[in-house]
Image (cartoon, rainbow, N blue to C red):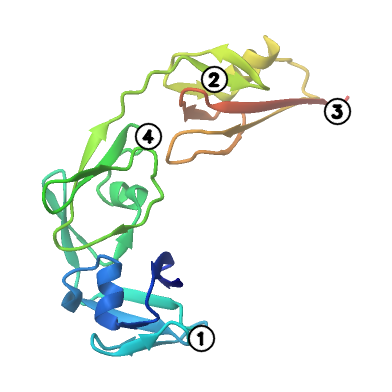
């Protein structure tokens, strides 16, 4: 088995010798005539590969390629045409381009033949972009029952939570002593920012079973 990457997405082949056309087809970049295929020769340099040019994947260093559309590609998102200049995009990138709130909606792609592929749980998946790409956003049916604070489930049903509310869930109250410092970190969050930290005044979106770590330091 031989492996190669196009735009940092990994593909495999049982054959070591492939043409530029074969490489683009395996990446589902069609029609192949719409894309320029480049081979990475060093950190900053690329050289073009013709569609009928044969590449031997057994050759040292032959594994990194970049595919670029010759002209902007028009794709449909919620029946609105948008121009893109990338050959691969993630659901998060597509929704950001279309100004769709990825914390409240997920992306579904309709492929040739009517097959529907949803990316609700894979927002970082690299999707091959072609002039036939059709997407629509679907509202997330978000039911929030609890969050996990320092390993313990805490009942919670609101779509947002503040820094102070997280601290209250853990300690029951907030000290007015200026020497008492609270820290909050979170994991398993919403797609746009699944992990991070909070400071006083922050309000973030909540996902069911979201995890919070809360700390308290007294510098008196």
Classify mark 2: residues with Cα within 10 Å, few (<14), some (14-19) or many (20+).
many
Question: Of helix, strand and loop, which one carries label 1?
Answer: loop
First-in-chain label (4 vs 1): 1
Considering only order in the chain, which callout, 2 or 1, is on the residue closer to the N terminus?
1
Closer to the camera: disc 2 or disc 4? 2
In terms of sequence position, does the residue under pointer 2 or pointer 4 come before the other?
4
Measured from the top left, where is residue 152 in percent x and y?
64, 16
Closer mark to the observer between disc 4 and disc 3: 4
SS class, disc 2: strand
Residue sitting at x 69%, y 25%: 214
Pointer 1 or 3: first along the chain: 1
Q: Residues within 10 Å of mark 3 (few under 14, many from 20)?
A: few
According to the picture, the residue beneath numbered tag 2 turns out to be 147
Give the labeled residue for mark 3: 219
Alpha-carbon span between mark 1 and mark 2: 47 Å
Q: Is residue 108 above or below residue 220?
A: below
CB-based contact (under 8 Å), mark 2 and mark 4: no
Quarter where residue 219 is shown: top right
| Circles 3, 2 touching at the beta carbon (< 8 Å) | no
* Gap in angstroms between the C-alphas marked 3 and 2: 29 Å
- Say which residue label 1 marks: 42
Q: State the CA–CA distance, disc 2 to disc 4.
A: 16 Å
Give the percent coordinates (x, y) of residue 64: 45, 77
Residue 165 appears left or right of 8: right
In terms of sequence position, does the residue under pointer 4 or pointer 3 come before the other?
A: 4
To which quarter of the image does residue 47 belong?
bottom left
Q: Is residue 214 left or right of residue 115?
A: right
Which of disc 2 and disc 3 is earlier in sequence? 2
How far from the left and from the top, in percent, is residue 100? 28, 41
Q: Which residue is mark 4?
A: 103
Residue at x 20% of width, y 75% of height: 32
The quadrant of the picture occupied by the C terminus is top right
């Amino acid at each position: 088995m031989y492996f190669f990457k196009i735009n940092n997405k990994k593909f495999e082949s049982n054959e070591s010798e492939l043409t530029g056309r074969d490489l683009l087809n395996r990446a589902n970049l069609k029609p192949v005539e719409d894309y320029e295929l480049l081979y990475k020769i060093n950190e900053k340099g690329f050289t073009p590969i013709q569609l009928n040019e044969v590449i031997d994947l057994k050759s040292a260093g032959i594994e990194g390629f970049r595919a670029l559309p010759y002209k902007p590609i028009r794709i449909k998102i919620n029946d609105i045409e948008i121009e893109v200049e990338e050959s691969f995009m993630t659901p998060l990138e597509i929704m950001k381009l279309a100004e769709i709130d990825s914390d409240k909606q997920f992306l579904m792609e309709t492929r040739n033949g009517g097959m529907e592929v949803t990316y609700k749980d894979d927002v970082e998946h690299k999707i091959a972009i072609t002039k036939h790409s059709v997407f629509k956003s679907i509202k997330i049916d978000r039911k929030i029952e609890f969050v996990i604070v320092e390993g313990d489930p805490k009942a919670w049903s609101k779509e947002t939570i503040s820094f102070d509310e997280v601290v209250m869930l853990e300690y029951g109250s907030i000290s007015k002593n200026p020497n008492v410092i609270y820290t909050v970190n979170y994991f398993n969050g919403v797609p746009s920012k699944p992990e991070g930290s909070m400071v006083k005044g922050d309000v973030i979106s909540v996902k069911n079973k979201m995890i919070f770590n809360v700390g308290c330091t007294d510098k008196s």
